[in-house]
Amino acid sequence: MKKQSNLSRLLDYAGKYRILTYLSWVLSAAGALLALVPFWYIWRILREVIEVAPQYKNAVHVTFYGWMAVVFAVAAVLTYITGLMCSHLAAFRIATNLRITVTKHIATLPPGAIERFGSGKLRRTISETAGATETYLAHQLPDKAKAMATIAGLLALLLVFDWRLGLLSLVPVALAFLVMTRMTGKGMQDKMTQYQNALADMSNEAVEYVRGIPVVKTFGQTVFSFKKFKGTIDNYERWVIAYTKQTRRPMTFYTLAVNSVFVFLIAGGFLLSHGGADSDVLLNLLFYIIITPVISLTLTKLMFMSENGMIVQDAITRIDGVLQSPSLSQPDAPQHPKDSSVTLENVTFSYDGAKNAIENISLSIGAGQTVALVGPSGGGKSTLAALIARFFDPQSGTFGALGHGVTDVDTGQLLPLDHGSIMDASVKAVKKGERASPGELKGDFDLTRDSGTLYANTECGIFGKLSAEDAAKITGAALPIAKKDEIKTGRAAILATVSGNETREYDIEIEKIYSPSGSTRNLMLRVTDEELLAQSGGVVQGMSGSAILQDGKIIGAVTHVLLDDPSRGYGIFIENMLSAAGLSSE
């Protein structure tokens, strides 16, 4: 599926106010073009004054031209203000809906997830980060439309009156633009992320510091006990000073280039007039000297817009980090426990995905029984208590693959499983599928280590348990599953690996859903992604088990390819796979 742009994602929150955003761009661009018309009237005033000199009383149109310049200047301001009103109405609605969405999702998170984010970072995400999108939509986007229209209008004006002076005035502009591009490229995006990280860390530790003030008063501790807070301030200071020093030289060159237009114009006017008094050259030179400051102002605005675009990109990434965190799961039919007993079976949990805090723990506490968790600091006592209270959900490490069983090539019967291992693999080549000749993925296995063990070979796939090390490598939010009755025909996607170890999302269409629940062919799909069709021809052998996604949920896995049409294949419901694995779909 094609990735949505930042703007498209923000406009999803606009509702009926979306049209106001588009209208603000049109009005801002119109205002920018209207703002250039007064310069044309100024040029006509200059021309008339130079033509009648020294008989200035013959300049009879000067007053009219002056009033017309004023009228268009006022019209430009009013048009721009109207555009800003539209953009602000839309921006306020988007920011409000965004804050409501984030706040509602935070309310569904397990308490442990909130603790892991940090209340200071969450507060900043809701208020300041969402506020950055408001500034971007209310001011930066209309100003961007205004700047683009201004540049188009300026280019026309600069080249129409005297193309030679126009080209001369564009030379320093081009130099300034090159310097600006170097300052606002990919490296700037990385630095903006570091800057926002430093601010977020400082905000989070500031909240924790304020919370700890009662402890300072009670126990007489000093501020130096809050080393984390001071550390974030020091880190921010180091980063800002280093970044300022790094951009000092290019910013100096940019300022020099963008403000040196007058030097080029004066030199060009002298050369074009051949040292004499040419009234036409003088007229155009005066006009260019008056209008070229608009160029430096517009370029500077574009530079800051690029910076704000990076801030919005970082803001959306941080908001996604919250929204993609899985909510505390709730069963469709909630049940009240019959008593207050607690049972844990083979529970594993890791905070950072690198090291398990507890591993394969089983525990049973009867109703009314009092139990003390005793052990050294860092032994997992608090983690275990948090899991029991559902501050976090345990991580099982169970996996399923293929979506169909491994069978005997002659009899078609399921092969009995004695033992088995899962290993890392890398796709090296793809044999493209053709009619009556299915394609296949070709690759290499990493035979040096096992990533997990298999415990079942069923008609709905093979199942096993990842090693603790490999389970800890899984990062990102878990996707919810879709019930059978939630699945519909239409657009969907598959996650597949057709080159190296890179798993990508490809567009498909669910064409038909079958009723038998026990089959491994529960739905028919057709690959519509042009890139995947060009690379593999569609579904090929080796894609079995590729997850099928629809509306942000896992609905099943690819199982088979149609021999007479490799662009089509079958899939199994995810509920069937979970049932075969002995896992609940709740």
Image (tube, helix red, strand yellow):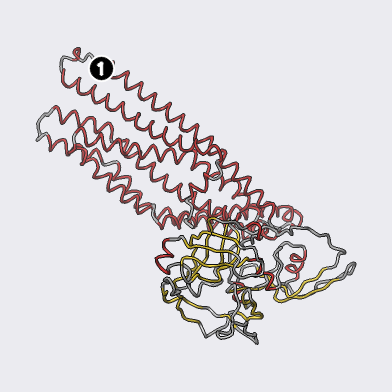
Most distant residue in the right direction: 368
* Residue 32 falls in image quadrant: top left
Residue 465 in sight: no
Q: Residue 399 at x, y = what percent?
A: 63, 73
From what the image shows, is residue 388 above or below residue 470?
A: above
CA neighbours of label 1 inside 10 A, class few (<14), some (14 to 19), many (20+): some
User: Along the line of sight, which residue is nearer the eye, 273 or 232?
Assistant: 273
Query: What residue sits right under mark 1 in the picture?
Result: 62
Instruction: Choose top left, top right, bottom left or bottom right for residue 547.
Output: bottom right
Residue found at x 35% / y 29%: 35
Give the x, y percent position of residue 57. Answer: 20, 12
Q: Residue at x 57, y 58 (%)?
A: 550
Q: Position of residue 545 (x, y in %)?
A: 56, 71
Number of marks drawn: 1
Please, which residue is most extreme toward the top here?
Answer: 57
Image side of residue 320 versus residue 538, left or right: right
Q: Specify the amino acid type for callout 1.
A: Val
Front residue of 523 and 205: 523
Q: For mark 1, give the secondary structure.
A: helix
Q: Residue 126 versus residue 499: which sits nearer the camera? A: 499
The answer to whether residue 264 shows anywhere in this view is yes
Is residue 141 placed above or below 196 in the rendered structure?
above
Where, quadrant-wise, is the C terminus in this rendering? Answer: bottom right
The one nearer the camera, 430 or 501, is 430
